[in-house]
Image: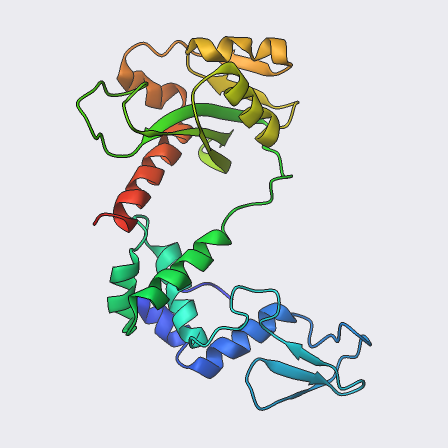
Amino acid sequence: MKAPATLSEFEQVFPSEESCWRHLRRMRWPGGFHCPRCRGTRSHRLGRPHLEQCASCRYQVSATAGTVFHGTRVPLRTWFWAIFFVARHKKSISALQFQRDAGLGSYKTAWLLLHKLRSTLSLRQDELLTGLVEVDESFVGGRKVPGPGGRGALHKTIVALAVEHRGEHAGRARLQVIPRVTHPEILAFLHSHIDPEAQIATDGLQVYRILPEAGFRHRRHIQGPRERAVQILPWVHRVAGNLKTWLRGTFHG
């Protein structure tokens, strides 16, 4: 089933709470019910919408077990609304805005739903980036005291970024907060997230000169004017820009 891209499509695909539960059960058991205890394929729906009971061994299985929805008292359709807004808005959505849009009575509930959903977006750390990988670092956060911009900006959080370059589009990305831009910190980030056979593209910062000695294939670009940065490392700058846009959209208050 194609995911809804507009509010109108969302209303058509998920018009009721029951339609959301039907979709969740299809996602949980795409080939039909499958009992984890006896491998039975027939079940009975119990009083609560998330519970199925195996017709063979009477084992009860929850459609929400092992998911972010397990144990929730919030209607499943509200969860689906939250997923829709998180996925649909490039600038993300604040908990206060979601509370208003979804008609929730509690800000805490809105915040908790968004927090749980965002916590599921982190990818498996054992999946290393491959091919040509752009690497850079970015400084995130408001300037608290007068100081220089760019690298070395005061009172900002340093985020290391690595993005697979796949020609006309980006592949997977990894982002990690690091305490400082030094050889040990950069190498630890690269070894944790990039396949040793990958080729790494960076700008001309001195900290990256050590990469060949560390066993990485390295493509080093001398940046020159700031405008050229987007040309030599397009996707890592796109991801860094999206990160800052997302943070402003979520925490603009």
How many numbered circles does the render carry? 0
Residue extending farthest bottom: 47
Q: Note whether 181 is above or below 33 in the view shown.
A: above
Is residue 3 or residue 239 the one in the foreground?
239
The answer to whether any part of residue 122 appears in the image is yes
Is residue 59 or residue 234 the one in the foreground?
59
Residue 177, given in percent of the width and then of the height, sits at 44, 33
The answer to whether any part of residue 130 appears in the image is no
Residue 150 quadrant: top left
Q: Is residue 121 left or right of residue 81?
A: right
Q: How is the image coloured?
A: rainbow
Q: Is residue 100 left or right of residue 174?
A: left
Q: Is residue 190 left or right of residue 228?
A: right
Residue at position x 26%, y 44% from top?
Answer: 248
Residue 149, given in percent of the width and then of the height, sits at 24, 21
Residue at position x 61%, y 65% from top?
Answer: 66
Residue at position x 30%, y 55% from top?
Answer: 93
Residue 9 quadrant: bottom left
Q: Note whether 31 is above or below 152 in the view shown.
A: below
Residue 152, given in percent of the width and then of the height, sits at 31, 18
Residue 188, given in percent of the width and then of the height, sits at 57, 24
Residue at position x 49%, y 29% from top?
Answer: 162
Residue 46 quadrant: bottom right
